[in-house]
Structures are given as structure tokens and as C-alpha cells.
Image (cartoon, rainbow, N blue to C red):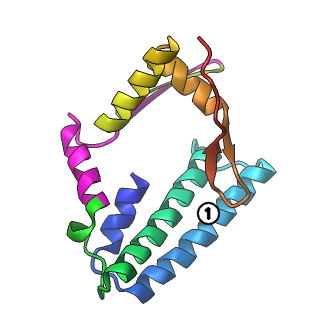
């Protein structure tokens, strides 16, 4: 969702405007990562880890768009000439609801989240889970347990073998 928002905002922007957005996103990413490291809290129900990941994704997308515009020698970003953007838009149209949807319920220490993944991601999660003898939600829980947010806001997971 964050990347799609950036692509919509970038439509028609030139390199200098894109560079301004990269700088803004870098600051926001750094601020969110710092707050996450310090264990700060947000007002309302917003999750710091999610905020940090969102700004990291936005920052990465702005940089990708800049690189694409420069490599193509264009004056401005045009989503229709961005192969990744076109592919992601097609995947969104393939989903029944047209967007990644989430539903969240909390009970005690347990959080239940239902999300709609793009078809390619969904197939990959199901295949890996099946190979490991797990349900998709069990695989994703193990994956989330291993997420590490770097000082720069980058999100990574070290290689691991899922346990059934």
C-alpha cells in the first residue's frame, strides 16, 4: 500500500521533486526507526514497527522511482511506463477485493490478522508452508518472530528452517 501511494504521488514529478520526496522519506524513516529503537509509543493504536516499515518502504520506492526515471532518461515519472508498477497494479486487480485487505482482532496477548496477499505471494507462502508441514499462518508467525529492523529502518529476516 505504501509503495502504491508513492507511485500515485510521483506521477508526473521530475527528478528534483522526486529527490525532495526521497529526503523527506529518509527523515521520516530515520525518525520512526529511532523511536522504535528507543521503545517510544504512538498516540492511538498505531504500531511503531509498522510505521517504521512503512517509511522504509516509501523511502525505497522513491529511490527506485528516481533510478528508473534517470535510467530511462525521462523528464518525469510515468507509472504506465514502469513495468513493476504495471505488474503490481495487475496483481491488485487479480485480488477479489482489489487491495491488500487486513482484519485484526485482539484477545489477551493474541493478535489474529487476516490479510489478502497478491497471488504470487500467496502461492509462495502456501508452497513453503506445505513443504515445511505447516499451515500458512504458522509459517508466517515463525517468519515474523525472526524479523529484525536495522538502524536505518531496513527490515530483514535471517535464513531459517521452519519447524513443524
Residue drawn 22% across the image and 70% down it: 81
- Which SS class for mark 1? helix
Look at the image and give the residue range highlighted in magenta. 84-108
Question: Viewer-proximal residue, 159 or 89?
Answer: 159
Image position of 11 with respect to 134: above or below: below
Image position of 154 with respect to 68: above or below: above
Q: Which residue is mark 1?
A: 29
Image location of residue 121, percent across then percent down:
37, 36
Visible residue check, residue 73:
yes
Question: Viewer-proximal residue, 119 or 72?
Answer: 72
Is 79 covered by the magenta stretch? no
Q: Quadrant of residue 24?
A: bottom right
Residue drawn 50% across the image and 11% down it: 133
Image location of residue 144, percent across then percent down:
60, 32
In-image side of 5 versus 106 (left or right): left
In-image side of 13 versus 151 (left or right): left
Is 93 covered by the magenta stretch? yes
Image location of residue 90, percent across then percent down:
21, 49
Q: Residues within 10 Å of mark 1 (few under 14, many from 20)?
A: many
Amino acid at each position: 500500500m505504501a509503495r502504491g501511494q508513492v507511485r500515485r504521488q510521483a506521477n508526473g514529478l521530475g527528478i528534483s521533486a522526486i529527490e525532495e520526496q526521497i529526503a523527506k522519506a529518509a527523515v521520516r524513516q530515520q525518525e520512526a526507526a529511532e523511536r522504535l529503537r528507543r521503545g517510544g509509543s504512538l498516540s492511538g493504536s498505531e504500531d511503531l514497527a509498522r510505521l517504521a516499515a512503512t517509511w522504509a518502504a516509501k523511502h525505497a520506492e522513491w529511490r527506485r522511482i528516481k533510478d528508473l526515471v534517470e535510467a530511462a532518461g525521462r523528464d518525469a515519472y510515468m507509472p504506465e511506463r514502469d513495468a513493476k508498477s504495471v505488474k503490481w497494479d495487475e496483481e491488485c486487480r487479480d485480488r477479489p477485493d482489489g487491495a491488500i485487505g487486513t482484519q485484526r482482532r485482539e484477545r489477551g496477548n493474541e493478535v489474529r490478522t487476516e490479510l489478502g496477499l497478491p497471488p504470487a505471494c500467496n502461492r509462495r507462502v502456501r508452497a513453503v508452508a506445505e513443504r515445511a508441514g505447516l499451515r500458512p499462518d504458522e509459517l508466517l508467525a515463525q517468519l515474523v518472530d525472526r524479523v529484525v529492523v536495522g538502524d536505518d529502518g531496513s527490515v530483514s529476516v535471517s535464513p531459517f528452517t521452519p519447524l513443524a
